[in-house]
Image (tube, rainbow, N blue to C red):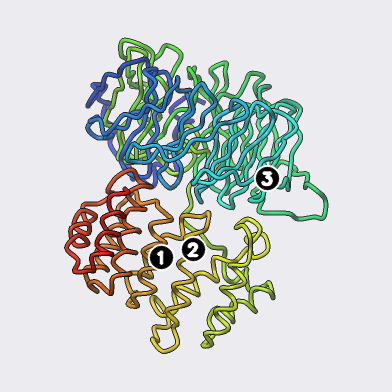
Amino acid sequence: MDCRVICVVFLVPIVSLAGAEKFERFDNKPIWRRAFGGEINTFPAQGPGSDVYIVAEDRALHSLNGDTGEVNWIYRPGGKLRSLLMIGADGTIYIQNDRREFFAVTPGGTGRWKLLLSAEMAVLPAGSSDGRVFLPLLSGEMLCVSRRGEILWTIDMGSEASASPVVNADGLVWIPLNSGKIICVDTWGEEIAHVSLDESVSTLALDGDERIWAGGYDGAISVFPHYTGRHSQSASTQLDPVFRLKTESSRVTAILTTSSKQGLVFYATGEAVAYSEDGEETGRFRIALSSGAPSVSTDGTIFAPVSDGSIRVVHPDAINAHTKLQVGSALSEPLLTEQGMLIAGGRDWILYAWKAGLPGSGWLQFRGGPLRSGTLPTSSAVIDRKTARKDSRFLIREQMAVSDSLEQRMKLVEEIESYTDELTMRKALPWVDLLLEDLVSIGTIRSVDVKSSHALVRAAGYQLISKGIDFRLRGLVLQCLRNEKDPLALAAGFRALGYIGSDWDGASMRTIYSRYKALGPQGERFILETARALMDLIRYNGGVSDSSGIDLINRLLSSDISNVNKKELLFILADG
């Protein structure tokens, strides 16, 4: 089967999303280019906003506007930076230097924290959709680190990782080991499943059904079913593949998957083979990748870094008219941004950008997408309520959460607060997010009855949410605060947004400003708590994430408060 047929077969789901378009030859002239102070031999990444990040051999992390190439900032943490770059789901940028220092950098270009590792990283890290980061070390250990820099757990994997981990929507981490084993680790660092292969894995990918595609150094392809948790009393469940095949004998260099569970596998010999969701070979063609993975747009165009140093642009409607993107030196694997720009670095110290097309839906870029985090982001932060109600323990606590009795609701708050750490609490109460939703939503977005909605409970609920690992509950807090009218609860909600921190889109800052403006100063404590929340946001994001923050600062400074609290206000605002 020729290249045209294979592209059409593999990319039909993507093309159908975009609609039929008449192919026009790709313009190989860069839209912009940006020179750096060192060679660029690694991949760019993009955060949840439009900013693009790149590590160059000038010992710096660079942030640019992906559409124009304009430099936002440059961050030099010290030491020579490794070819490691990952963006957390909350917008945090992660890098590492040659001193085993792992850095978290804010979207504004300031250092948030650093962690000294006991050993070098064996492979690239992975990040979950709730904000956690997983670091596989050469020592055979793997660390789970919160977005605040706290080591949540460490496990001894018994062998060094052979390829980078992937994380599914349930937060389960799949790690391939040099021993040929792939282990699945749950939220608490416990191995709950494993598979054993004849040869170690060179690359992993997820498909639209959360199945694991494993490509081996021996050319074998194995696909394992979506696994959600423990199904037996054994220490670790042995999983059988949906299918396993070996049509080639060379290393698997990259795997792309679509939302419809098809796979396109690239081999070191230059073969590219497409498989159906059942493992049937649907076609093949030749394209010799240089390294890493191609990127695919919604109209089915493939942008592949090939062995001659160029990026080959292959369109399913005009295979024989493919275009080469070629500069004065070899190009690194490309990034296809959410805005449709194709960006790749050259060894001539220049970063190039071309107008391409929107990225396709699925695992269709290196490490799954622009974040380079080894996961397919999910917005859901809570488990299904219908499923939770099958647990009698949840039913009892749900009745407490929605009770008209303040005493009952506060008893539930006290129980949640009694846990010494969140991982222990979530292991005991896996549906706790549903209870927190009940605590803060009654009186704001549902059952709006001032007499029985208990602002004190909502204030406590906001505080509990702010202490959590999962930053995605920010969306719930934003929704509630837009209808929150009680000053005590509103101040607690402001502080929750500040402590959660993530505000790459400026929504938290805008919400605090709009609610403060609508209600006006509600006492001196309210003013001070608003200021603290604002400065928490500024510190976490490395700057003012929305222009409304400047307006809020001016409003706070013009507040008519006592001299003592005026002094405290100035101290708070100066501490950012």
The residue type indicated by label 2 comes to Ile
Q: Earlier in the sequence, mark 3 or mark 2?
A: 3
- Asked if residue 122 is positioned above or below residue 371 in the image, the reply reads above
**Residue 367 visible, this orientation:** yes
Circle 3: is it few (<14), some (14-19), or many (20+) Cα within 10 Å?
many
Q: Which residue is mark 1?
A: 477
The residue type indicated by label 1 comes to Val
Q: Position of residue 371 (x, y in %)?
A: 43, 38
**Which residue is painted at 68% across and 63% down in the image?**
428
Is label 3 in contact with label 2 (beta carbons under 8 Å)?
Answer: no
Is disc 2 placed on a helix, strand or loop? helix
Q: Nearer the viewer, residue 234 or 437?
A: 437
Q: Is 139 positioned to the left or the right of 128 in the image?
A: right
Q: Which residue is mark 3?
A: 185
- Asked if residue 574 is positioned above or below residue 443 in the image, the reply reads above
- Checking the image for residue 104, the label placed there is none
Measure the alpha-carbon separation of dots 3 and 2.
Answer: 25 Å
Q: Earlier in the sequence, mark 1 or mark 3?
A: 3
Is label 1 in contact with label 3 (beta carbons under 8 Å)?
Answer: no
Q: Nearer the viewer, residue 336 or 97?
A: 97
Is label 1 in contact with label 2 (beta carbons under 8 Å)?
Answer: yes
Is disc 1 placed on a helix, strand or loop? helix
Nearer to us of marks 1 and 2 is 2
Q: Earlier in the sequence, mark 1 or mark 2?
A: 2
**Which residue is painted at 74% across and 38% down in the image?**
195
- Asked if residue 449 is positioned above or below residue 204 in the image, the reply reads below
The residue type indicated by label 3 comes to Val
Q: Is 389 positioned to the left or the right of 555 in the image?
A: right
Q: Position of residue 186 (x, y in %)?
A: 66, 49
Q: Which residue is mark 2?
A: 465
Nearer to us of marks 1 and 3 is 1
Circle 1: is it few (<14), some (14-19), or many (20+) Cα within 10 Å?
many
